Amino acid sequence: MRLPAKLLFLLILSLSICSSLSSQVHYVVKGRVIDFDTRQPLASASVTIRESQSGTVTDDSGFFSINVYMEEATLQINSIGFTFYTKSLHLKDDNRFLNVSLKRKANEKLDEIVINAFRDNAKVRGTEMNIVRLNPESIKRAPLLFGEADLIRALITQPGVTNAGEAAGGFNVRGGNADQNLVLLDGAPLFNTSHLLGFYTAISPDMIQDATLHKGGMPAEYGGRISSLLTMRVKNGFSDKMNYSGGISPVSVRFNASGPIIKDKLAITGGVRAAFPNLILNQFKGSYGDSKAFFYDALLKPEFQFNNTTRLSLTGYRSYDKFRFDQETEYEWQTDLLSLNFTSELSKKLSLKINANTGKYESSINGIRKDYESSLKSSISHSQGKVQMEYKMGEHNKIEVGGDYILYGISPGTQQPTSSSSNINFRSIEKEQGTEMAAFISTEIDITSKISIQGGLRYAAYQYRGPKKVYQYEEGVPLTKEAITDSIQYGKNDNIQGYAGLEPRIALKLGVNDDFSFKVSYNRGQQFLHLISNTTAISPVDFWKLSDNYIRRQIGDQFAVGVFKNFKDRMYELAIEAYYKVARNVVQYKDGATLLLNPLIETGLLNARSKAYGIEFSLSKTTGIFTGQFNYTYSKTQVQVQTPFLTEVVNNGEYYPSDADRPHNLAVLTKFNLGRGWSFNANFIFTSGRPATYPDGFYAFNSSLVTNYSQRNRDRLPAYHRLDIGFSYITKRAADQKRYSVWNISFYNVYMRDNAYSIYFNKVNNRLKAYQLSVIGGIIPSLTWNFYF
Amino acid sequence: MKFLIILFLASSTFIYTSCIKEINPRLRNALPELVVEGSISTDSTLYNIRITYSGQIELINQIPDELLEKNASVSIHCSNGDSTLLRYIGNGYYETTDSLFIGLVGLSYWAEIILANGKKYVSVPEKMNEIVPVDSINVSFIPDFNLEHPAYFRAFVNTSDPVNQENYYKWEFYSYTRRQTYGVLCGGQCVKWEFCLQKISENELNLFSDASVNGNSILGQGIGNSYIYTYGVQYFNVTQVSITRNAFQFWNSYKEQTTRTGDLLDPLPAAIRGNIVNSDDPADYALGYFSTRALYNKKLVINPFHITEYLLIISANSFIHPEYVACFEHFPNSLSYGSPPADPVPPPPGWENADTLKVVFTL
């Protein structure tokens, strides 16, 4: 506890020193850039002073602040797809806060490419790498599954991002596990990102301004996960008047409203989506066929603007799912969260951000069989406070410091009867508590006009706390119930086990010119939370577990290098990135382990290490009638169980492919602007099959043939590929037209490929036969109507 | 737009979503692994241990000769110091010879297997648990039938779980159900051996842990089906087996791995870890399990009553074999008594004094 306090002191001290170094007199021009049509802020727009060739970019809310060292200057603002903005500044007399509305270029109204829409030249000029940006509005015009635009489905077309299969929850980044992704909604973490067991993302893209995935090298202000960071920013309500939008698809209905309550002071954004997918589920054969499902998500964000430099917002979010799998079991899962964000520019150079958030994810397995009515609930709650300050030093350099404190509470499982006639007894696994405290410092420095460095250091300290009974096991033997030698009862807030460590993050850019750069990065992360799951994809039977005496923190290191090149005035963008990452203490499972309601969960788990490497190639055409992307990744991800006990060894102690290992990953995304509001999209996806465990022999037992699986993940499912096409039609004809519709007609899986979700073996007439389950086995047409007024 | 809507509607006729199809994946060939299956129970009987090897087996009743272990030395040991040798009786089976060697509640038992190559495998000792009696058995008439099976009875067990101990249950069920052929003509209107009793066991695996219901009633635990191929009395045998926690975990893994459907909630494929280990190499596990079984057995005579006849006609007629053959010769595992076999067939041995249960069908 003493070390983080010291570190925080040093960080603040360094900030004070930096502050005293710079005392030059100059003007500061501030402003905000928004999209003229949608009234939404434009992030990452390039803001430059022509005479000095100095510049900056707008922040997530469209705000910018730039230093000017002359009285007369020319301000230029540029954002891809928008008209160029220029203004002469007379700084002695002028108002130094500018509200700028950029109009879209004539042939690009609402037609910007879906992904990697870097509005400035950040891909080449910025120091950051390993980043994917999504424009949720444009996803609606791409081919859709069952008519629902989906953020994660769009993400997994990007290099280095995969998932476990069709309709599988979560996503894997550069071979990482799904629980190693930190997913933030306005700064608050989401512990479940799926609706309908994984068919859809739990956030409607209607509500999202933009989404950014950091595939590695996440900024030092973030921590707690070792694979990736996905930040989603809720739309901003500040505009001239209330805007309404919605949509109807074969699965859901949506309605959203956004606009000012008190002009320039108070704005609100809200939306709800409800889905009744039973009609679709009933078309499924096999175990989904008799299923019943329902889900909704709702979001409300009031935002108060004190003045041009100080804002306060509160984001409230709920998602809920109910899924009846058969006549005996029903699954429910729900996320609730609140996130309060305060930002203020305290001076010309110093700004402050405060975030406080709290949330809870709860899943429940409900027994509905007569005499055994029960619910088995598990949950994770999370409360976090975070403060950070940014100090600008000169034209291109800045330093950020801050700290955060997180309180975790986990209920691993509580089973109770839900009717008076139920024979189920009350059972509960002791709750877990933990705290995580972190301090960070990061800086961006242009060493020369061609070399930039972005460095960060994060120190995170974690404590597993009481009350809790911790079992002691005999040394030198595997952890089993029989090996228990003693137990210690810890009191409330007693420190049981702690982990702490430094997490360096560094990125270096060498720019050859404005259109060509090399980048290299290294980062380390620590993770104190683990998703306990014995299924390939995230499912409602999974639950979270804190690091303790036996389940150690995960540590991940990633090295990456990249080459970025633009051609033909940025019409073409090329990015090639290579990475190598290793992770320690990844959770694996003993064969046949009991996970649910096991008070000795450590007896079923194993620590493992993983390593992954890959090369990602992405070529984008960003402007013109035809736009698109060609993405290809080659990668390998392997895991090795670490145990001194021969009885726990998996695959002879060798590295074997992890569940996320899919070596070849190709996505070709194309869009043709057909004119008169029409566009045509065609996407082709090819991915190596997921590792699988096939039997390597059969044996007779209990008068049946039994499959023997002696080697984990030594086999592979057939390759996954499909083609989707879609037509989109927008009725908007003028830039200021407020009432319009967007129609989407999609054909998913056009050539009706039976992509394997899994392969399993069943006994038929005393013979074992192999079967392939395909979640989507045919073409899925859909028609979606989105309206705006 | 009109063209697209037509295209959209036309393609709707090709919609189908999930599908399951049979495939022939290329499988790896691993070295054969030793498989041991055996148990000792509280029943006064001879006990079997079967020793085979894993390999490419296509049919359960056609295990290649090279996968049968015929030359092992097999014995069962008790914590009180007793032991007994088993002799090879064929098809991989070894059997005890001492009929007085019977499993006793509270004692622990293990098996030792010494292979011809000198490797010695020993099972982890298992305690014989207390016998837990069955309170009652309910039988329901299930009027569902299709081309593969007629309507059937389903048996349910009710048990009072003891409060002061961890209990793990496994239920076993078999029945003798009436079958019918056209019989054998014996002159004039005479037809004999038209009916017989066939032993039916679907090998349904029903397990239960009292972790959630300790000390309460276990009600309506479905344990097996008996099909009504033709109208007549049926004979049920219900066995409630008390097993150990380790055996329960083994059978639970066995059930998970043998009933996988490939869907999202499927557990990952994994080896089913048993309790038989090479005494010189703790990493060398044999497949299979040697368990202790504390048995409570109950026999019932099922007397169908008021079961709507037309349902049975629709349901069962297609299951009457349309040839003039003796029923007991046509259907495997059928009972026949005496020489020539008795007609009609008397109750199977053991059911002479069994309780009778009337099963009434109500809509």
Image (cartoon, rainbow, N blue to C red):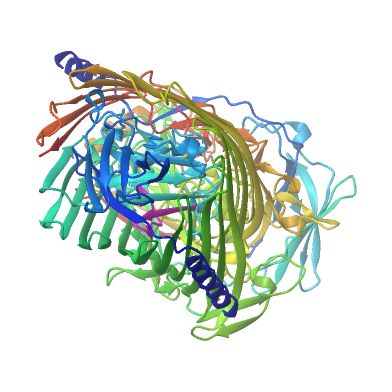
Point out the image quarter for the N terminus of chain B: top left
**Outermost residue, top side:** B3
What is the quadrant of residue B70 in the picture?
top right
Q: Magenta includes A499?
A: no
Residue A26 vertical position relative to residue B92 in the rendered view, above or below: below
Q: What percent of the width, then of the height, locates residue A75?
A: 31, 42
What is the quadrant of residue A206 in the picture?
top left
Q: Left or right: B308 with respect to A698?
A: left
- Along the line of sight, which residue is nearer the eye, A10 or A276? A10
- Residue drawn at (12%, 48%), measured in percent from left and top? A240
Q: Is residue A614 visible?
A: yes
Q: Left or right: B177 with respect to B272?
A: left
Q: What percent of the width, then of the height, locates residue A130?
A: 52, 42
Q: What percent of the width, then of the height, locates residue B262?
A: 48, 39
User: Magenta segment, which residues?
Assistant: A181-194
- Along the line of sight, which residue is nearer the eye, A276 or A374? A276
- Along the line of sight, which residue is nearer the eye, B133 or A661? A661
Residue A67 vertical position relative to residue A502 in the rendered view, above or below: above
- Residue drawn at (57%, 69%), measured in percent from left and top? A600
Q: Is residue B173 visible?
A: no
Q: What percent of the width, then of the height, locates residue A684?
A: 42, 23
Q: How many marks?
A: 0
Residue B165 vertical position relative to residue A491 in the rendered view, above or below: above
Residue A536 vertical position relative to residue A642 in the rendered view, above or below: above
